[in-house]
Image (spheres, rainbow, N blue to C red):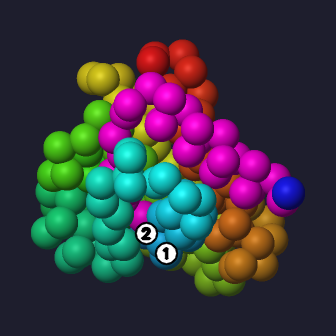
């Protein structure tokens, strides 16, 4: 089993066992995390919603990402990722929100380098994020970002759950 599928399977099992619900806010991962989790039978036990907010406007509308955060930090920032995770959790009424935002490359975005990605979790009033500096192709970066987001989610569930 590929590493990313193993990570999805472990998260799937944890969410199911602990009766926790999940909402996703994916940007740079483009729905890859939702796909990985729902490829495994039984995801309907925990997976409530996933939104792909690729544009700035979509992040503001669907996730309540404030314009002030975008102006001060940009959408490729830990601050944006944390608010996106919160927005997904609150809007869907779930226990957990997981978000991804970043620049997969090859060009700079918001004057930030290709491969800079943030993943964030909002769970039981606590927040965690991870900054990634990825160096692969767009597809490799997308897979790495999805895998790291699942790892962060697993760590959060195990330590806070």
In this picture, is 159 found above or below 45?
A: above
In this picture, is 105 found above or below 85?
A: below
Is there CB contact under 8 Å for labels 1 and 2?
yes
Residue 50, label in figure: none
Q: Residue furthest bottom?
A: 107
Whole-percent x, y for residue 123 in the image: 35, 30
The residue beneath circle 2 is 27
Q: Residue furthest right?
A: 1
Q: Residues within 10 Å of mark 1 (few under 14, many from 20)?
A: some
* Residue 140 forms part of the magenta stretch: no
Please indicate whether residue 117 sits to the left or right of residue 87 in the image.
Answer: right
Whole-percent x, y for residue 9 in the image: 66, 48
Asked whether the viewer can see residue 83, the reply is no
Residues at marks 1 and 2, CA–CA distance in whole angstroms = 5 Å
Asked which quadrant contains residue 63, the reply is bottom left
Magenta region, mostly helix, strand or loop?
Answer: helix
Q: Residue at x 50, y 29 (%)?
A: 17
The residue beneath circle 1 is 30
Please indicate whether residue 6 sits to the left or right of residue 85 in the image.
Answer: right
* Residue 5 forms part of the magenta stretch: yes
Q: Residue at x 21, y 76 (%)?
A: 57
Please indicate whether residue 159 sits to the left or right of residue 147 in the image.
Answer: left
Please indicate whether residue 90 sits to the left or right of residue 112 in the image.
Answer: left
Residue sitting nearer the eye, 103 or 32: 32
Asked whether the viewer can see residue 124, the reply is yes
Residue sitting nearer the eye, 91 or 5: 5
Whole-percent x, y for residue 74 in the image: 36, 61
Q: Which region shows up in magenta?
A: 2-26
Q: Residue at x 60, y 28 (%)?
A: 155
Q: Residues within 10 Å of mark 2 (few under 14, many from 20)?
A: many
What is the quadrant of the N terminus in the image? bottom right
């Amino acid at each position: 089993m590929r590493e990313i599928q193993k990570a999805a399977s472990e998260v799937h099992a944890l969410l199911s066992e602990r009766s926790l619900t999940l909402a996703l806010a994916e940007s740079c991962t483009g729905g890859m995390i939702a796909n990985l989790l729902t490829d495994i039978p039984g995801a309907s036990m925990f997976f409530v919603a996933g939104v792909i907010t690729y544009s700035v406007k979509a992040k503001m509308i669907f996730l309540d990402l404030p314009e002030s955060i975008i102006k001060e930090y940009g959408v490729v920032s830990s601050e944006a990722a944390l608010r996106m995770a919160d927005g997904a959790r609150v809007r869907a009424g779930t226990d957990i929100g997981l978000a991804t935002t970043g620049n997969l490359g090859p060009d700079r975005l918001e004057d930030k380098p290709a491969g800079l990605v943030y993943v964030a979790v909002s769970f039981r009033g606590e927040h965690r994020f991870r900054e990634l500096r990825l160096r692969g192709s767009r597809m490799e970066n997308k897979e790495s970002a999805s895998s790291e987001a699942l790892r962060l989610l697993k760590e959060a569930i195990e330590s806070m759950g």
